[in-house]
Amino acid sequence: MKLNTKYHGEVEINEKDIWHFENGIPGFPDEKAFTILPLLDDGVYRVLQSVQTPYAAFVITSPFLFFGDYAFKIDDATLEQLSITNEEDVLVYSILSVKEPFSKTTANLQAPLILNQKNRQAKQLILNGTAYQTRHPLFADKPEKGKG
C-alpha cells in the first residue's frame, strides 16, 4: 500500500509492516496504525509513522543504546493486552524530542513504546513511580571548551 509520510514523502509499505495500537497513543487516540521506517541509514534512529495521518510521525530509538541501565517491568495488564508470552518477542522504543542542535535532543523514558513482534500489537506504556521522566537528555552533557 502507498503511504504519505512526514519525512520520506510517498513510500510503499506492506500490510504486515503495520503495528496496531488498540488505544492509539497519548495525545493521538485516533491514530491506531503505524509503521516504522528508518530515519537514517545508521539503524539507530527510526520514525514511527501513522498510516492514516502523514504529519503524525515520531522520531524513535532504542533507549538501551543510550541508557545502559534503563530497566522497568511491564505490568500484567499490558502483557495480557499485547498477548506477550515471551520476552524475546518484545521491542522497546523511546520517542525523542528532537532539538536544535541535535545534541540537545531528549528521550521520553517515562512512556516507552512496547511492541510485540509476534502479533504486531503495540502500546505506549506510562511508567508510574519511577525516576524516569519525559525529557532525559539523549547525550551526556559535555563541558564547553574553555569552561570548567
Image (cartoon, rainbow, N blue to C red):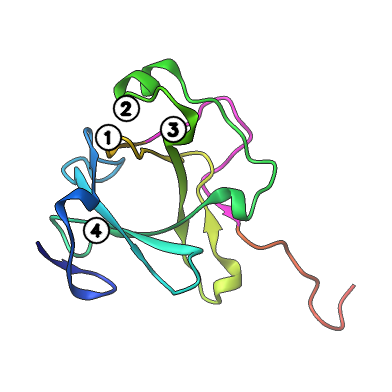
Mark 1 vs 2, N-terminal side: 2
Distance from disc 3 to disc 1, alpha carbons, whole Å, reads 21 Å
Quadrant for the N terminus in the image? bottom left
Q: Are marks 1 and 2 in contact (CB under 8 Å)?
A: yes
Q: Amino acid at mark 1?
A: Asn
From the viewer's perspective, is the residue at label 3 or at label 1 nearer? 1
Q: Are marks 2 and 4 in contact (CB under 8 Å)?
A: no
Could you say which quadrant of the image residue 144 lies in?
bottom right
For mark 1, what is the residue? 119
Specify few, some or many for label 4: CA neighbours under 10 Å numbering under 14, 14-19, or 20 or more: some
The answer to whether 19 is drawn above or below residue 140 in the figure is: above
Instruction: Identify the disc placed on residue 84.
Output: none
Quarter containing the C terminus: bottom right
- Residue located beneath label 4 in the image: 56
Mark positioned earlier in the residue sequence (2 or 4): 4
| Callout 4–callout 3 Cβ contact below 8 Å | no
Outermost residue on the right side: it is: 148
Q: Please report the residue visible at 51 percent of the width from the left and 26 percent of the height from the top.
A: 128
Q: Quick one: label 3 or label 1, which is nearer the N terminus?
A: 1
Which amino acid type is marked by label 3?
Ile
Asked whether 105 falls inside the magenta stretch, the response is no
**Amino acid under label 4?**
Ala
> In front here: 15 or 52?
15
Say the numbered circle drawn on residue 82: 2
Would you place residue 24 above or below residue 54 in this image? above
Q: Are marks 3 and 1 in contact (CB under 8 Å)?
A: no
User: Within 10 angstroms of label 1, few (less than 14), some, or many (20 or more) residues?
Assistant: some
Quickly name the residue at label 3: 126
SS of the residue under disc 3: loop
Left or right: 35 in relation to 139: left
